[in-house]
Amino acid sequence: MLFSKILLAYDGSKASNKALDRAIELSKATPGSSIQVLHAFDFPRVFIGEGLAPIPASVNKDFYDLAEQTVDEAKKRLADEGVNFNVEMIQGAPAETILKYAKDNGSDVIVIGSRGLGGIREFVLGSVSHNVVQHSRIPVLVIK
């Protein structure tokens, strides 16, 4: 099966680095294809009772800086491989952001790692990859 617009959900985790390798393989197998790398990140929120506690701006800046560093790593690896690519960083809930991006950009396939950097949130709310698989209208390749 050939895909011309490969959407890679990338968060810098071990699994997403394996997914990056697979997206590169898929792209090289299809001349003229491109990899759309999406790093979806969200700022932390702290709930106290029924209210939302303010997060210091320095913490949000740290999260943004980490997101930029993650995107730069992906750009470097893709440039070294010589494939066509576009890298974007979007703030929002990861699964919803990935699905919306795939729909809005006409992606043919979503490549995603099986486990990201979600930690306890993944345990409580369900993994991003599981959510993407359940709600995607296009094929999803989950890399372990």
Image (tube, rainbow, N blue to C red):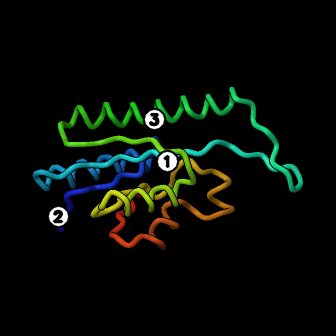
N-terminal label among 1 and 2: 2
Disc 3 element: helix
The numbered mark, 1 or 3, whose residue comes first in the sequence reads: 1
Left-right relation of 118 to 7: right
Q: Quadrant of the N terminus?
A: bottom left
Horizontal relation, residue 40 to residue 56: left or right: left
Residue drawn at point x = 46 percent, y = 58 percent: 114
Residue 33 drawn at (x, y percent):
17, 52
Query: Looking at the image, which is closer to me, 43 or 80?
Result: 43
- Determine which residue is flagged by label 1: 40
Q: CA distance from mark 3 to mark 2?
A: 28 Å
Q: Quadrant of residue 64?
A: top right
Instruction: Name the amino acid, label 2.
Output: Leu
The answer to whether 69 appears left or right of 103 in the picture is right
Residue type at tag 1: Ala
Q: CA distance from mark 1 to mark 2?
A: 25 Å
Nearest to the eye among marks 1 and 3: give it: 1
Q: Residue furthest right?
A: 49
Q: Nearer the viewer, residue 54 or 140?
A: 54
Q: Is residue 3 above or below residue 52?
A: below
The image shows residue 94 at horizontal and vertical percentages of: 53, 54
- Residue 32 rendering spot, x and y as whole percentages: 12, 51
Residue 2, disc: 2
Residue position marked by numbered label 3 in the rendering: 70
